[in-house]
Image (cartoon, coloured by chain):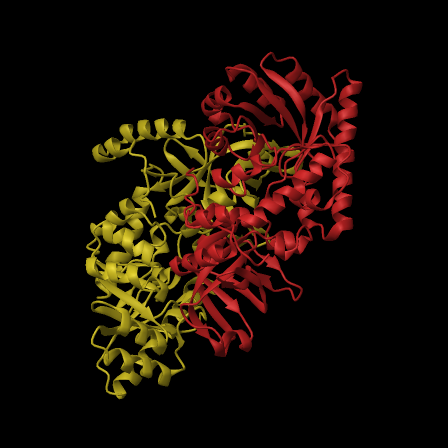
Chain colours: A yellow, B red
Amino acid sequence: MQPLPFAKDLSGALTLGRERDILAAMKRMTKEITKPTLLVDQEIVSNNIKKIAEKCVRQHVRLKPHFKTHQSAEVGDMFREFGISGITVSSVSMASYFAEEGWEDITVAFPVNRLEIDAINRLAKKAKLHLLVEAEESVRFLDERLEGGVDIWIEVDTGYHRSGIPDSEKREIAAVARAIVSSTKLRLRGLLTHAGHSYNARGKDELEAVFRDTADRMAAIELALREQGIAKVEISVGDTPTCSIVEDFSGVDEIRCGNFVYYDLMQYFIGSCRLEEIAVALACPVVGIYPRRGEFVLYGGAVHLSKEHCVGTQGQKIFGYVCTLTEAGWEMPLPDTYVSSLSQEHGIVKAPPGVLDNLRRGDLLAVLPVHSCLAANLMKEETRLIQSLTH
Amino acid sequence: MQPLPFAKDLSGALTLGRERDILAAMKRMTKEITKPTLLVDQEIVSNNIKKIAEKCVRQHVRLKPHFKTHQSAEVGDMFREFGISGITVSSVSMASYFAEEGWEDITVAFPVNRLEIDAINRLAKKAKLHLLVEAEESVRFLDERLEGGVDIWIEVDTGYHRSGIPDSEKREIAAVARAIVSSTKLRLRGLLTHAGHSYNARGKDELEAVFRDTADRMAAIELALREQGIAKVEISVGDTPTCSIVEDFSGVDEIRCGNFVYYDLMQYFIGSCRLEEIAVALACPVVGIYPRRGEFVLYGGAVHLSKEHCVGTQGQKIFGYVCTLTEAGWEMPLPDTYVSSLSQEHGIVKAPPGVLDNLRRGDLLAVLPVHSCLAANLMKEETRLIQSLTH
């Protein structure tokens, strides 16, 4: 993994923080953009981090943010200002990258991949490492092959059915816990779950229900373990939708949400964020205008945005909302205008005549992505940190 | 864009071409793979190129292969053995990359992006450049801003409705043609279309019908232009489904298909290729096994395969077929076993008990991707050129 080579054009203006300088820098920057470029609005990012970080402080819960969304040393550094010292990642490669960047407490929130045991051993010498297991088989493997001590979390499936031991299988979870406790290298740290089924919820009430159900299931396991003589362990949860909305985190010790740093249209459709909280937009040149079809074409396709889509209220597939991009940042989305399909490099946008009539080939527009984690991953080499004046 | 850093482990064995050496090299290589890695089977690639290249020679049609699928200098070089000297790409960035690699005749098959005019002018000094226009506005822009001569193709929309002037708009196409002819810098080379609607066709008869319809529409425009006094121009078409199946290319001068170099499940579902002709597979470690759910989990997700899916005969979403990976290469897909959903790093595979009972965490399996262009783009930094013995 390469660090994000963020353009540094704006650093002077940002340090000075003077409106005129930012405007001038933005103007220069939008002139320099000639092809799809992911813009990251530093102020929105900072506000998004602040909101969750302060809520965690109020709720006495540890925030261990998932860095799989931005995968960037620079954006990672913005978390340090809010007192964050431990992070979550989804691969050993990503953990190694952030360990190089000075992060010393890292959870790899992915079932341990035994083929990477050599990389894991190297990493454990650099950082305090937390690993996930979801089977006794993996505990035995780690006990045999680890060269030093690591913290272990048992991954629990509380309803998402991706990975982890189902929360109903308390006997199996207890057996894994005992195997960990009896190892000299492994330290049983807690129970961890990703309630990814929250992505099917819509709105505050449904999200709160998912969070409460998840916390209750985890608490029931923790109690069952204690009844079997295992000392109290921590509970870690971590999806962005519930962590964004829920105000009462009681029953959990740690949250690991990640997407909230940027948010995206998927989160907006779920109800986790407002459009104004989406911190990334893909700047795209207009390359074709087809008024007869009610469409125009952007240079910006599946290799920039990914093929993830939302479903609109009319059942239509939405691959992005389209915004005007000015020297002051991106505006709110143009009404009734959305990316309706993507091929490798083309983005087809449906738009009303009022939009089409005012477009010219060579205009630069901004697309709010459906899934910022995938877009940021694709755009690693073409990302710019900006500070807009619109939000 | 970076060149693909293909592992060179196999080069010795490949040069010797002795079965035992290849086996030994494959064995070493599969042992070295610890995380998702795209395997490219050199022999299948070579056969795929040979089949289309020889058909083009027989049919007296120029093959100008689209390099957007592999985006790789090494794979590009394999085309030279079949006499290919001109190539197609879908971005100015990709054109610049291949120009550096010594390709001297390059079509950028994407509506000209005027914001990249400086890069275009640099490129035109290095290679014979072909650009696409789909509006008079773009012709005027190029005439004003180009520093040297380039070949121009008018992009025609023959039914895909992505970009290009609709073939029914003969007056508009003629106006663009006249504007090109009257420019001193632009040379009208021909009419170009991408019949991407062939991806909705299924089987030989439907694909032949799309090809014939496309060729007929293009011929009608060419005739209309000649009737207006414009000298005969060339006709270029280029989707992989029709170009793979059609044996009679009469009526066209050039084909620009690209995906055929690797093929993928999408092409297999259309009927463009056999499973044995798919030249890429993603090697993925098994990280979780859930017999109660009838599923297992691979380290291999949307950041490796993309979110593209096929729809199976039962209406199920298929994100990849799963194959056994041995020292001799990947086998045919395991029956009734497929990737049913993807998150960022996880691939969930539905599988029958006979498969699940024989799996262990740490096994390495191979996934045939749905869309090889997107998977190869995502895996640029983790690709290996291999030669298997299974095909």
Q: Residue A135 lies in what quarter of the image?
A: bottom left
Q: Residue B237 lies in what quarter of the image?
A: top right
Foreground residue, A210 or A205?
A: A210
Q: Judge whether B360 appears above or below A52 on screen.
A: below
Foreground residue, A317 or A1?
A: A1
The x and y percentages for residue B106 are 56, 28
Q: Residue at x 55, y 77 (%)?
A: B354
Q: Judge whether B171 appears above or below B72 on screen.
A: above
Is any atom of residue A113 visible in this view?
no
Q: Is residue A369 left or right of residue B160?
A: left
Q: Judge whether B262 appears above or below A215 on screen.
A: above
Q: Residue at x 21, y 35 (%)?
A: A15
Q: Is residue A71 left or right of residue A348?
A: left
Q: Residue at x 39, y 74 (%)?
A: A213
The x and y percentages for residue B222 are 75, 25
Quadrant showing the N terminus of chain B: top left
Foreground residue, A370 or B385?
A: B385
The x and y percentages for residue B325 are 50, 62
Quadrant showing the C terminus of chain B: bottom right
Q: Residue at x 33, y 50 (%)?
A: A71
Q: Residue furthest bottom?
A: A228
The x and y percentages for residue A110 are 36, 64
How many numbered dots are placed on residues in this image? 0
Is any atom of residue B322 visible in this view?
yes
